[in-house]
Amino acid sequence: MRLRALAALTLMLPLVAGCGKPAQEAPAATTSATATASPSVAAATLSGRPASALHLDAVDFLSPQIGWLAAHRGSTADILRTLTGGASWERLAAGSNDFLSLDFIDPDTGWALVRAGSDVQIEHTADGGATWAVQWIGAAADMRYLMEVEDARIEMLDPQNGHALFGGQLLATANGGAAWQPVTTLPAGFTPTGMAWRDAQHGWVAGMSCPAPAGGSPCHVGVLQTSDGGASWASDFTASEAAMPLAAGAGLPGLSFPTATQGWLYFKTASLEGRLYATADGGATWTLEQPFLAGGRGVAGLPVFLSPTTGWLPRDAGAAPQPGGIQVTHDSGRTWTWVGAEQGWSITALSAVSAKDGWAIGRRAGSPSATFLMQTSNGGATWSESALTLRPTGAIDFLSASVGYGARSASDPGAVLRSTDGGATWSVRALLPGTVEAISFADAQHGWAVDQPWPPSQQLLDVMATSDGGATWREVAQMAQSSLPVPDALRFFDAQHGTLMIGAHPDWLVLTSADGGRTWTPVGHRAVTPGTTAVVTMPASGDLLLLESTPALLRSEDGGVSWASLPELPAGLGRGIGLGAAGTKDVWVFLQSGARTVLLRSANSGVSWSRTTLPGAMPLGAPLSVSAISGSAAWVLSGSGLFATRDGGQTGTWLR
């Protein structure tokens, strides 16, 4: 039997244009911007995907090589397909509806649960996801409760027979979806929330019986079994303890049967205790396996048992927040290990194709704008992020037109990434133990990072160093955390000399090191008004630049002891959100006002500026991480993605 658990997530992140291909250099500019006191104005163009984050909604893999994703990019929905185990992806379909759940029975034939405005639809594809036809429509207002991510599920047993479960409704088809009929034979007052089917005749349904009004408390969990395709049902099990109300949705009853006899039931009690029951005789008897599994206010999804011994339980941190991740067992549920909790994972969907191979989608708690796709080939013991979503999310530092480093990924705040193709693709170079707040490389071998160790309550910051291009790191200094640095607050000029700006209102300290980061000496400070976003970078001269959001640009030529305002920036263009510098005189300043982003560029240390207005479909959020290697070439990282320009911002290319 092919096993999978699918769920939905109401999030949003764009398909990487040309995923896996080197970035294309932007075409040469047709006009040149002249630096004058009143900046000349040019309109920029941007190629590649739209500037909105790709949010993964559902996942379904048919084999370790063939799989599909449902995703959002702004208001556009995509179906993505891989035939290479995630090495490359093809965008097949686009629309405006939310795909909640996917189920494919062969490379061409699949079904989906879709939310379309106030309706829920069942849709079908016969061409691998390229086109979809609506088979059934129902009003969301008719559902017994608001759908939660863990119970929107469609499961086809063969080309003709299948079931859909969502919002307390169970539907069945016996003709490939030409007709979907509600299952009306369930006991009165019983609301189904989970299902497991052996074939078209034999199956189990988990759910709740609650007093009126529906969804009230106390509710009690039950398991029903059918051997005649749902024409009649027998009660297998009724829990004695009260369960969470239906409306809570943070641990609705879910089932998993990897064989005809062995199954598991998971739910949460009214006191938020996670219960795991097991059966070894097809549901005739149930025993309590775990009385306190994945309890608390976090959202626990449907259990997924891949074999009689190996099982997963996805956890979404929810709004509490509580630790999320995936809990994994390899001894039939007797003991569990927790994966992804320290990384802050919130897992929203799983798809398993064997006891070893599986996929998960999710996000990190506190970072809803970046979702990730993870893969395991060892039963969930370890996971790696797919190339589809792998990119820096914290800071970047490019050394050349091809080689760059990045801090943090969507799945791991301690990730150090490297690109050798100008930012088009990335690989994980190392995983530091905490959260990488800033990163700087003096050359291809020597680099430094500011790492906030786990747990953050220690109020410490570690300075980490590498001498082998980021493959291995060692702690060279530790300091008390007064506040976190902005993305580009760390800069090393060579293997020994570096500068770090860190602090809290009202003073930001400037620290320097002359011994490779082992010791740091305070040399100056800068008062920063409350609410000001400060971004700092250091040109090759060693001078410091500071952009305040007012906007104002300041320069220090003595390591931060004293600061002088550079010539006033043009008025009325918005607040400062990003700063980059290269050489001794090239400066890049990004300003934002509403949906408009303006790039000011100077080739003479801010004496005069050229001005470029970036496209309106290019929203950038503060703070930006800007890495410039010259007056014309730079990379910009924001919550929307990573883009590069080779002609001073007049044209650009979205990379990730």
Image (cartoon, rainbow, N blue to C red):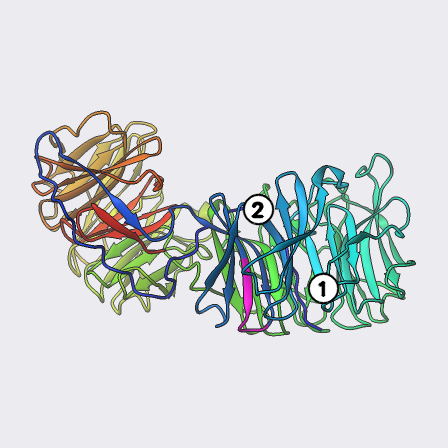
How many circles with numbers are drawn on the protein?
2
**Residue 204 in the figure: left or right of residue 619:** right
Q: Quadrant of the N terminus?
A: bottom right
Q: Amino acid at mark 1?
A: Met
SS at mark 1? strand
For image coordinates 33% across by 41% down, the residue present is: 623
Q: Quadrant of the C terminus?
A: bottom left
Residue under label 1, please give it. 156
Q: Quadrant of residue 477?
A: bottom left
For image coordinates 40% across by 57% down, the residue present is: 16
Q: Could you tell me residue 367's position as x and y percent? A: 47, 46
Nearer to the camera, 369 or 264 = 369
**Residue 66 within the segment the image draws in magenta:** yes
Instruction: Mark 1: give few (<14), some (14-19) or many (20+) Cα within 10 Å.
Output: many
The tag earlier along the polypeptide, 1 or 2, is 2
Asked if one can make out residue 289 in the rendered structure from this viewpoint, the answer is: no
Magenta residues (range): 63-69
**Residue 238 in the figure: left or right of residue 539:** right
Tell me how far mark 1 sits from mark 2, CA to CA.
22 Å
For image coordinates 25% across by 47% down, the residue present is: 626
- Residue 506 disc label: none
Q: Could you tell me residue 53's position as x and y percent? A: 43, 48
Q: Amino acid at mark 2?
A: Asn
Q: Could you tell me residue 113's position as x and y percent? A: 65, 52
SS at mark 2? loop
Instruction: Mark 2: give few (<14), some (14-19) or many (20+) Cα within 10 Å.
Output: some
Residue under label 2, please give it. 97
**Residue 426 within the segment the image draws in magenta:** no
For image coordinates 16% across by 53% down, the residue present is: 28
